[in-house]
Image (cartoon, grey):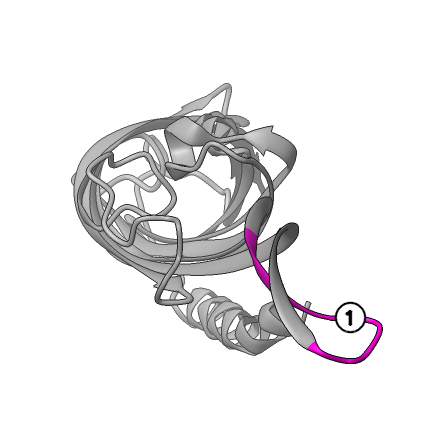
Amino acid sequence: MKSIAKILPVIIVICSLCFTINAANPYSLSDSNKHSAKYAVSIVPSYTLENGFRFDLDIHLCKNQWLVIGPHYFIARNQNMGLLLGLDQATDMDGYGFDIYHKILLNKDVTVNGPYFAYGFRYDHFSFTYTDFAWVKILDAWNTPYYDWEETKITETNNRYGVNLMFGLQYALNKKLLIDGYTGCGIQVSDISPANSKIADFSNFFLRYNYSGPRFLLGVRIGLFLF
């Protein structure tokens, strides 16, 4: 919760700025292209592949431009995540993060429907706890220290940062339902702590939590426009 509190003021400031911009930049379009929605909310189902949930808030800035803020959360309990983590032990995981990106519809005369280009930033923080064997210092009955190979809980953390570029196609079904498919690429840097972590710092599999390198993006957003 302390880590979430550190980034919460940043998100609040960004949201406040976006609402101010939105109020100060009215748009004028032809009746055939005008869409009265100023906001949209959506989810990204593909995040369930990472034991996560992502909720997006779209804010209409002006004309064909939107700002998207997407907080995401991750949770897993006593799971073997060898494929996604590179670690065979049963693991508890907690994580949070956010995406923020600027979306520009390629047709400047529309506000909602059509192809778009987007770019933005991504941040995630993870905490992994698993059981393993390690040398543990023990005191005997005479307070003499010795070491024994015992089962112990190990916690490791991971921060990852990335930038993304995307192309997508967005559509408003019956002016209410948001359907948005996108693809693109990005680059990601992952930082594991402690330095002697059993989780490899640089994984060669782009779906792993601790991966660093180029990423391929593909997904669908489903949601509702708000008026």
Q: 214 or 59, which lies in front?
A: 214
Q: Is residue 24 left or right of residue 94?
A: left
* Residue at the image position 17 percent from the left and 40 percent from the top: 185
Give left or right: position of 116 versus 22. left
Instruction: Say if residue 108 shows up in the picture.
Output: no
Which residue does the image show at 56% across and 48% down from the upper left? Answer: 133
Q: Is residue 151 above or below residue 175?
A: below
Q: Residue at x 45, y 64 (%)?
A: 22
Image quarter where the C terminus lies is top right
Quarter occupied by the N terminus: bottom right
Which residue lies at the image location 18% right of the left edge and 36% below the top edge? 184
Q: Is residue 74 magenta?
A: no
Q: Position of residue 141 (x, y in %)?
A: 84, 72
Q: Three-letter amino acid code at disc 1? A: Asp
Pick the front one: 64 or 104: 104
Image vertical order of residue 142 relative to residue 79, above or below: below
The percent coordinates of residue 47 (x first, y second) are: 47, 33
- Few, some or many C-alpha atoms within 10 Å of disc 1 (few <14, some 14-19, many ≥20)? few
Q: In the rendered image, is residue 74 in sight?
A: yes
Name the element at disc 1.
loop
Closer to us: 215 or 129: 129
Position of residue 67 in the picture relative to residue 213 (left or right): right
Depth check: 167 or 163 in front? 163
From this view, report whether residue 136 is shown above or below residue 12.
above
Counting from the top left corner in percent of width and height, residue 54 is at 53, 41
Q: Which residues are magenta?
A: 134-144
**Residue that mark 1 sits on:** 140
Residue 179 placement: quadrant = top left
Q: Residue furthest front?
A: 142
Q: Is residue 207 above or below residue 136?
A: above
The x, y position of residue 2, in whole percent, is 66, 74
